[in-house]
Amino acid sequence: MFVKVCGLRTAEDVDAAVAAGADAVGFVFAPSPRLVGQDLARELAARVPASVLTVGVFRRQPLEEVRSLVEASGVRAVQFHGDEPRSFYEAFPGHVLIRASGEVVDHGAMGEDLLLLDAPVPGEGVAWEWKAPGHGRKWLLAGGLTPGNVAEAVRATRPWGVDVSSGVEISRGVKSPDLIRRFVETAKAAQGVPWTRPGDA
């Protein structure tokens, strides 16, 4: 079970996610209470071991802005949360690409490596009608997940992985190390299937 903890803003956040066993950590560059700048993101990413994927999250931002932030921060994956065209994905060869959508559709033609199914309004901590996408691509479930409901969500949809942000916060944008630990442990226990890191044979 691949677990991504998103919206990290402090060294404590990052250290807690890594210590808990998260497989990926996300830094938000789009307007949000969890927004970080390129300098802070670079400092935080430097704390992350190579075995954990660092992800930059963007939403309807100009391509050159995205490119600049990716290069400056050094993140290894790019997650698009808007309706970005295929050219945006093609601009990042060598990066893991994640397409986020609240719709159950096949984005395979977009060329991304992973599909993330999120709530229609991301980052609000609102659960939606979880459902599998109906195709064989690797996909992540997000949207209203918490330590209390992630096991149910995993059993119901059998995703390749899960993504959490507001569900491990004590207030908007403020993470709880204890909630992070509980979420990662619960998610991984819910489906003990080993995963293959994107790019591995």
Image (cartoon, rainbow, N blue to C red):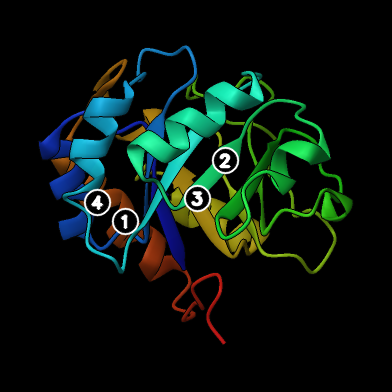
Disc 2 element: strand
Structural distance between the alpha carbons of marks 4 and 1: 6 Å
Residue that badge 3 annotates = 77
**10 Å neighbourhood of mark 2: few (<14), some, or many (≥20)?**
many
Q: Nearer the viewer, mark 3 or mark 4?
A: 3
Q: Tell me if residue 191 can be seen.
A: yes
The earlier-in-sequence mark between 3 and 1 is 3
Amino acid type, callout 4: Arg
Q: Amino acid at mark 3?
A: Ala
Residue at 21% over, 51% down: 181
Q: Residue beneath label 4, please?
A: 182
**Residue 79, disc:** 2
Instruction: Give the label, 1 or 2, closer to the camera.
Output: 2
Judge from the rendering whether residue 63 lies leftward or rightward of residue 188; answer left or right.
Answer: right
Mark 1, residue position = 184
Task: Examine the rendered structure and indicate whether residue 55 appears above or below residue 101.
Answer: below
Q: Residue at x 16, y 50 (%)?
A: 47
Label 1 CA crowd tier, 10 Å (few <14, some 14–19, many 20+) = many
Alpha carbon distance from label 3 to label 4: 25 Å
Asked if residue 177 is positioned above or below residue 161 in the image, the reply reads above
CB under 8 Å between callouts 3 and 1?
no
Residue type highlighted by circle 2: Gln
Pointer 2 or 4: first along the chain? 2
Assign a secondary structure to mark 3: strand
